Amino acid sequence: MPSSPLPFAVSLLALVSTVASPLRAANPEVKHVLVVVGPSNHAPGTHEVRAGGRLIADCLKHADNVTGIETTVVTSWPTDAAVLGKVDTLVFIGDRFPGEELPNRDQTISDITKMMDRGCGIVCVHYATGLGA
Protein backbone atom coordinates (compact mmCIF):
# COMPACT_ATOMS: atom_id res chain seq x y z
CA MET A 1 0.00 0.00 0.00
CA PRO A 2 1.47 3.40 -0.97
CA SER A 3 2.44 5.68 1.87
CA SER A 4 0.76 9.00 2.48
CA PRO A 5 2.36 12.04 0.80
CA LEU A 6 1.88 13.99 4.05
CA PRO A 7 5.31 13.17 5.58
CA PHE A 8 7.03 14.31 2.38
CA ALA A 9 4.91 17.46 2.24
CA VAL A 10 5.79 18.29 5.85
CA SER A 11 9.49 17.66 5.14
CA LEU A 12 9.30 19.84 2.04
CA LEU A 13 7.65 22.66 3.99
CA ALA A 14 10.39 22.41 6.63
CA LEU A 15 13.05 22.49 3.90
CA VAL A 16 11.55 25.57 2.24
CA SER A 17 11.34 27.29 5.63
CA THR A 18 14.93 26.33 6.48
CA VAL A 19 16.32 27.56 3.18
CA ALA A 20 14.06 30.60 2.94
CA SER A 21 14.50 32.00 6.45
CA PRO A 22 18.08 33.27 6.04
CA LEU A 23 17.23 34.53 2.56
CA ARG A 24 14.54 36.91 3.80
CA ALA A 25 17.19 39.38 4.90
CA ALA A 26 17.65 42.46 2.75
CA ASN A 27 20.26 40.76 0.58
CA PRO A 28 19.42 41.29 -3.09
CA GLU A 29 21.95 38.80 -4.44
CA VAL A 30 20.86 35.41 -5.72
CA LYS A 31 21.30 32.46 -3.37
CA HIS A 32 22.31 29.16 -4.91
CA VAL A 33 20.88 25.84 -3.77
CA LEU A 34 22.44 22.60 -5.00
CA VAL A 35 20.19 19.54 -4.75
CA VAL A 36 22.16 16.28 -4.98
CA VAL A 37 19.85 13.32 -5.61
CA GLY A 38 20.65 9.68 -5.01
CA PRO A 39 21.83 7.16 -4.50
CA SER A 40 18.65 5.18 -4.02
CA ASN A 41 18.21 1.44 -4.08
CA HIS A 42 14.43 1.59 -3.73
CA ALA A 43 12.33 0.22 -6.56
CA PRO A 44 10.84 2.76 -8.99
CA GLY A 45 7.58 4.16 -7.69
CA THR A 46 8.51 3.78 -4.02
CA HIS A 47 10.98 6.56 -3.17
CA GLU A 48 11.56 8.65 -6.27
CA VAL A 49 14.53 10.71 -5.15
CA ARG A 50 15.07 12.30 -8.57
CA ALA A 51 11.44 13.39 -8.73
CA GLY A 52 11.75 14.60 -5.14
CA GLY A 53 14.79 16.67 -6.07
CA ARG A 54 12.93 18.24 -8.98
CA LEU A 55 9.95 18.92 -6.71
CA ILE A 56 12.16 20.66 -4.15
CA ALA A 57 13.64 22.84 -6.92
CA ASP A 58 10.19 23.67 -8.28
CA CYS A 59 8.84 24.58 -4.84
CA LEU A 60 11.80 26.88 -4.18
CA LYS A 61 11.37 28.48 -7.60
CA HIS A 62 7.69 29.21 -6.98
CA ALA A 63 7.79 30.06 -3.26
CA ASP A 64 5.77 33.23 -2.67
CA ASN A 65 7.58 34.15 0.53
CA VAL A 66 11.12 34.33 -0.84
CA THR A 67 12.82 35.47 -4.03
CA GLY A 68 16.30 35.25 -5.44
CA ILE A 69 16.89 31.50 -5.22
CA GLU A 70 18.56 29.61 -8.04
CA THR A 71 18.32 25.83 -7.66
CA THR A 72 20.33 23.22 -9.54
CA VAL A 73 19.51 19.50 -9.33
CA VAL A 74 22.35 17.03 -10.01
CA THR A 75 22.74 13.26 -9.85
CA SER A 76 26.50 13.32 -9.32
CA TRP A 77 28.87 15.49 -7.32
CA PRO A 78 30.07 18.52 -9.34
CA THR A 79 33.81 18.59 -9.94
CA ASP A 80 33.94 22.28 -10.93
CA ALA A 81 35.24 24.29 -7.97
CA ALA A 82 33.52 27.42 -9.34
CA VAL A 83 30.13 25.68 -9.15
CA LEU A 84 30.75 24.50 -5.59
CA GLY A 85 32.09 27.92 -4.58
CA LYS A 86 28.80 29.68 -5.25
CA VAL A 87 26.53 27.17 -3.46
CA ASP A 88 24.83 28.64 -0.38
CA THR A 89 22.84 25.54 0.62
CA LEU A 90 23.39 21.85 -0.15
CA VAL A 91 20.36 19.56 -0.17
CA PHE A 92 20.91 15.81 -0.21
CA ILE A 93 17.99 13.50 -0.97
CA GLY A 94 18.51 9.74 -1.14
CA ASP A 95 18.97 6.56 0.85
CA ARG A 96 22.37 7.42 2.30
CA PHE A 97 24.54 10.45 2.72
CA PRO A 98 25.96 10.79 -0.80
CA GLY A 99 29.40 11.85 0.38
CA GLU A 100 29.87 8.28 1.56
CA GLU A 101 28.58 6.78 -1.70
CA LEU A 102 29.83 9.04 -4.49
CA PRO A 103 33.05 8.42 -6.41
CA ASN A 104 36.08 10.22 -4.98
CA ARG A 105 34.66 10.01 -1.46
CA ASP A 106 37.58 11.79 0.22
CA GLN A 107 37.46 14.71 -2.23
CA THR A 108 33.67 15.00 -1.90
CA ILE A 109 33.87 15.08 1.91
CA SER A 110 36.69 17.64 1.67
CA ASP A 111 34.58 19.80 -0.66
CA ILE A 112 31.59 19.61 1.70
CA THR A 113 33.78 20.49 4.69
CA LYS A 114 35.20 23.55 2.90
CA MET A 115 31.71 24.64 1.87
CA MET A 116 30.34 24.34 5.40
CA ASP A 117 33.40 26.13 6.82
CA ARG A 118 32.52 29.15 4.67
CA GLY A 119 28.91 29.08 5.89
CA CYS A 120 27.15 26.88 3.34
CA GLY A 121 24.06 25.22 4.82
CA ILE A 122 23.27 21.53 4.53
CA VAL A 123 19.89 19.78 4.49
CA CYS A 124 19.47 15.98 4.38
CA VAL A 125 16.12 14.54 3.31
CA HIS A 126 14.81 10.95 3.67
CA TYR A 127 17.57 8.50 4.62
CA ALA A 128 20.23 10.93 3.41
CA THR A 129 22.02 10.92 6.76
CA GLY A 130 23.12 7.31 6.35
CA LEU A 131 22.31 6.46 9.94
CA GLY A 132 22.21 2.73 10.52
CA ALA A 133 18.98 2.89 12.51
Image (cartoon, grey):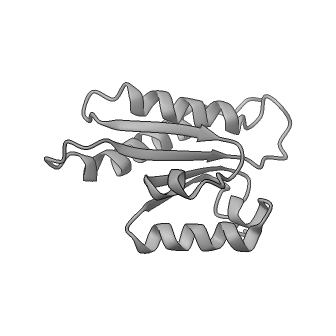
Q: Looking at the picture, does residue 67 appear above or below residue 27?
A: above
Instruction: Report the side of 87 relative to 78 (left or right).
Output: left
In this rendered view, identify the residue nearer to me: 77 or 98. Answer: 77
Instruction: Report the side of 69 relative to 59 (left or right).
Output: left
Locate the N terminus and report the quarter of the image it occupies: top right
In this rendered view, identify the residue nearer to me: 29 or 95. Answer: 29
x and y percentages locating residue 44 in the rendered image: 83, 31
**Residue drawn at 42 percent across, 62 percent down:** 120
Q: Looking at the picture, does residue 102 appear above or below residue 25?
A: below
Q: Looking at the picture, does residue 50 appear above or below residue 17?
A: above
x and y percentages locating residue 29 in the rendered image: 25, 44
**Residue drawn at 37 percent across, 24 percent down:** 62
Locate the C terminus and report the quarter of the image it occupies: bottom right
x and y percentages locating residue 111 in the rendered image: 59, 68
x and y percentages locating residue 84 in the rendered image: 52, 56
Instruction: Report the side of 114 relative to 61 (left or right).
Output: right
**Residue drawn at 37 percent across, 67 percent down:** 119
- Toward which corner of the image does residue 3 lie, by quadrant? top right
**Residue drawn at 70 percent across, 59 percent down:** 98
